[in-house]
Image (cartoon, rainbow, N blue to C red):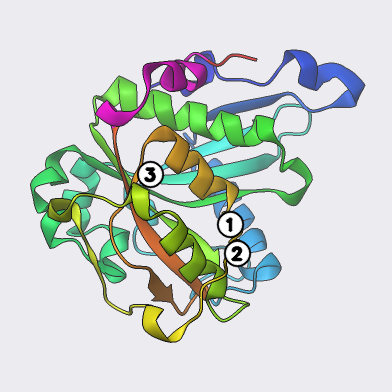
């Protein structure tokens, strides 16, 4: 797949000395390393996650060699400013698991494994956190799914626990209408104690989670606590058949 062909943010972004950005799949070890360094800066340095790693300043784990790495590059300076890690079904078979299985029992999704892509480690450089950069990552991901014929997208939406979980619990209750049918339910290995945490009445929903909800994703179960990132994670499942055609075209055909 060549995401490079048509997914860029030229045009208006070029005005006022704004960067020209392109989204693509990393095709070299140096590009993957740059994405891993970006992940470290965002997750470890900025957000305080405790990430085990063999190389200081680099977020790398067992799954990385099996994944495709979607990146956003600033063509003016060569910087990798956005990243998404993608584990396609054939690679998941080689690994023997999905990353999310460290947090959730995915037994009820077993029948989807031949058609299920997992995404994670989504991050954007602090200097590039604009709607254009986010849209490019979504565009690259949408093209990846379409061009490879994958039918289901799975990933975790992480919610900070700095408030003791009140926002996470509030979000879970506020989005009750977006919960998956029972046959797609998953079960957290370290569940957040929903009955002991008073959820916020006006929860702040992270932009990534909002994007998934607009696309038609389901929340597949109660939130799990991720001790390494100190987040509450919701397992999301997006059947591509549920994505509104106009919404899909907006990203898949995005050029500017």
Label placed on residue 86: 3
Q: Which residue is mark 2?
A: 43
> Cβ–Cβ below 8 Å for labels 1 and 2?
yes
Image height check: is 253 above or below 129? Answer: above
Please tell me whether mark 1 sits on a helix, a strand or a loop.
helix
Q: Is residue 246 magenta?
A: yes
Q: Residue at x 38, y 82 (%)?
A: 195
Q: Residue at x 42, y 21 (%)?
A: 248
Q: Is residue 179 left or right of residue 108?
A: right
Q: Residues within 10 Å of mark 1 (few under 14, many from 20)?
A: many
**Residue 243 appears in which quarter of the rendering?**
top left
Q: Is residue 49 left or right of residue 79?
A: left
Q: Which residues are magenta?
A: 240-253
Q: Which residue is mark 1?
A: 39
Tell me how far mark 3 sits from mark 2, CA to CA: 17 Å
Of 216 and 84, which appears nearest the observer? 216
Image height check: is 145 above or below 154? Answer: above
Report the magenta stretch's main SS. helix
Of 207 and 181, which appears nearest the observer? 181
Image height check: is 238 above or below 148? Answer: below
Q: Where is residue 165 drawn, in percent x and y?
A: 52, 76
Q: Which image quadrant: the N terminus?
A: top left
> Cβ–Cβ below 8 Å for labels 3 and 2?
no
Tell me how far mark 3 sits from mark 1, CA to CA: 14 Å
Q: Is residue 75 magenta?
A: no
Image height check: is 107 above or below 23? Answer: below
Q: Is residue 71 left or right of residue 147?
A: right
Q: Residue at x 43, y 86 (%)?
A: 196
């Amino acid at each position: 797949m060549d995401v490079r062909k048509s997914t860029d943010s030229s045009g208006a972004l070029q005005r006022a000395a704004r960067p020209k950005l392109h989204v693509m799949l990393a095709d070299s070890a140096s590009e993957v390393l740059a994405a891993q360094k970006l992940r470290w800066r965002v997750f470890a340095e900025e957000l305080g996650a405790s990430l085990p790693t063999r190389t200081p300043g680099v977020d790398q784990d067992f799954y990385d060699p099996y994944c495709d790495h979607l990146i956003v590059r600033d063509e003016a300076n060569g910087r990798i400013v956005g990243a998404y890690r993608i584990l396609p079904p054939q690679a998941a078979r080689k690994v023997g698991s999905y990353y999310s299985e460290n947090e959730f029992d995915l037994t009820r999704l077993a029948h989807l494994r031949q058609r299920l892509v997992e995404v994670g480690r989504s991050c954007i450089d602090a200097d590039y956190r604009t709607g254009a950069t986010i849209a490019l990552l979504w565009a690259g991901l949408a093209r990846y799914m379409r061009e490879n014929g994958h039918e289901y997208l799975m990933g975790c939406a992480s919610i900070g626990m700095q408030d003791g979980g009140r926002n996470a619990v509030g979000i879970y209750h506020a989005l009750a209408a977006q919960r998956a049918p029972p046959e797609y339910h998953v079960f957290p290995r370290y569940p957040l104690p929903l009955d002991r945490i008073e959820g916020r009445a006006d929860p702040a929903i992270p932009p990534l989670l909002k994007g998934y909800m607009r696309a038609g994703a389901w929340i597949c179960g109660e939130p799990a606590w991720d001790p390494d990132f100190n987040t509450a994670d919701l397992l999301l499942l997006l059947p591509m058949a549920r994505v509104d055609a106009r919404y899909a075209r907006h990203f898949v055909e995005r050029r500017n």
